[in-house]
Amino acid sequence: MNTSQSVLLVEDEEIISIVIESILQTRGYRIDVCRNGMHAWEKLQANPAAYDLVLLDWGLPSLDGIELLRLIKSDPILASIPVIIETARSDKNSIQQGLNQGAYYYLTKPFQPEVLLAVVDAALEQRNEQHRMQENLRSAERPLALMQEGRFRFQTLENARVLATHLARTCPEPERAVQGLQELLVNAVEHGNLGIRYAEKGRYVLAGTWIEEINRRLQLPEYSQRFAEVSFQRGRDELSFTIADQGNGFDWTEYMDFSPERAFDIHGRGIAMARQLSFDSLEYLGNGNTVTARFILGGYGTP
């Protein structure tokens, strides 16, 4: 973990802010505290690169949390900063309002220290992963852009991440494609071939044993021979990727959109983010162990 990362904590209740700051400092994070939304917005505008994450109370003086969230997500420079909303509101309409504005991470008051740390760690790890993917894209060559079709087999998370970076280079907007491709390829390993259920992953992530569990299952006889496949095909108007695993499938319908019911979970946003942010269309087939993602090429698919 990068312990030099900075968090902007926007919280008007002094005791709560002191508690949060103390908890986060145990991870080595640098914390900057603002007591109202307008002050926080001024800080973000003055130095957009200063913060890796914003931890934002919903109810704030001068500029409330949801309005500050809207401003952050509508700013092209700030939009990629993850925002965690801390709130006592748990009604579906309030949560949906935050999801619509880009609040993919929630903390409900009162919260436990281990939950706070797990959610902050998860949000920052996603941001770190995005940075790594962008760096890899900038340094990668583009031989795959000349291919019309291809098929790859993979078994591990590292395989999935490497493939996502290179396959994104076949797309007209690699930076847009890479996160969604990685999400689908990683899901094929974790939830597909290794059979890890949604609730199980939440427990492993909260306990900090997620990677250990992945590596353990990869060695088990019932999983060690399984592989997933990704194939792509380039047409004149469309580029499609089909990912298939050897698992039992899942009910994918509830994961296609951001759900207020899962807003306070540590994970579970990936498919919805991939569908909304990375692809022009996303379609699960059969029992859910096969998915096709498509990009519209606008008539420029053939080199």
Image: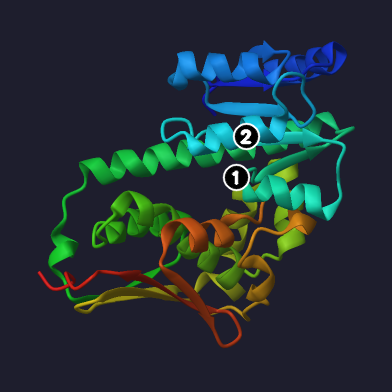
At x 48%, y 72%, the residue is 282
- Quarter holding the N terminus is top right
Would you say 87 lies left or right of 210 here? right
Q: Which amino acid does label 2 sit on?
A: Leu
Which amino acid type corresponds to the residue marked 1 in the rendered image? Gly
Q: Which residue lies furthest to the right in this view?
A: 110
Q: Is residue 30 visible from the viewing direction of this image?
A: no
- Count of numbered badges drawn on the protein: 2
The label on residue 167 is none
Q: Position of residue 6 (x, y in %)?
A: 56, 19
Q: Whole-Å distance between the Cαs marked 2 and 1?
A: 8 Å
Q: Position of residue 259 (x, y in %)?
A: 71, 59
Q: In this view, does 182 lie above or below 126?
A: below
Q: What element carries label 2?
A: helix
Along the viewing direction, whichever of 59 and 19 lies nearer the viewer: 59
* Residue at (28% x, 75% y) in the render: 238
Q: Name the residue under label 2.
A: 69
Q: Nearer the viewer, residue 166 or 225?
A: 166
Judge the density around disc 1: few (<14), some (14-19), many (≥20) Cα neighbours within 10 Å: many
The disc, 2 or 1, on the residue closer to the chain's N-terminal end is: 2
- Residue at 77% x, 33% y is 86
Where residue 278 sits in the image (x, y, percent)?
Answer: 43, 58
Residue 263, relative to residue 185: is it above or below?
Answer: above
| Contact between labelled residues 1 and 2, with CB atoms less than 8 Å apart | yes
- Label disc, if present, on residue 102 of the rendered structure: 1
| Residue visible at 50% across and 38% down in the picture | 74
Q: Is mark 1 on a helix, strand or loop?
A: loop
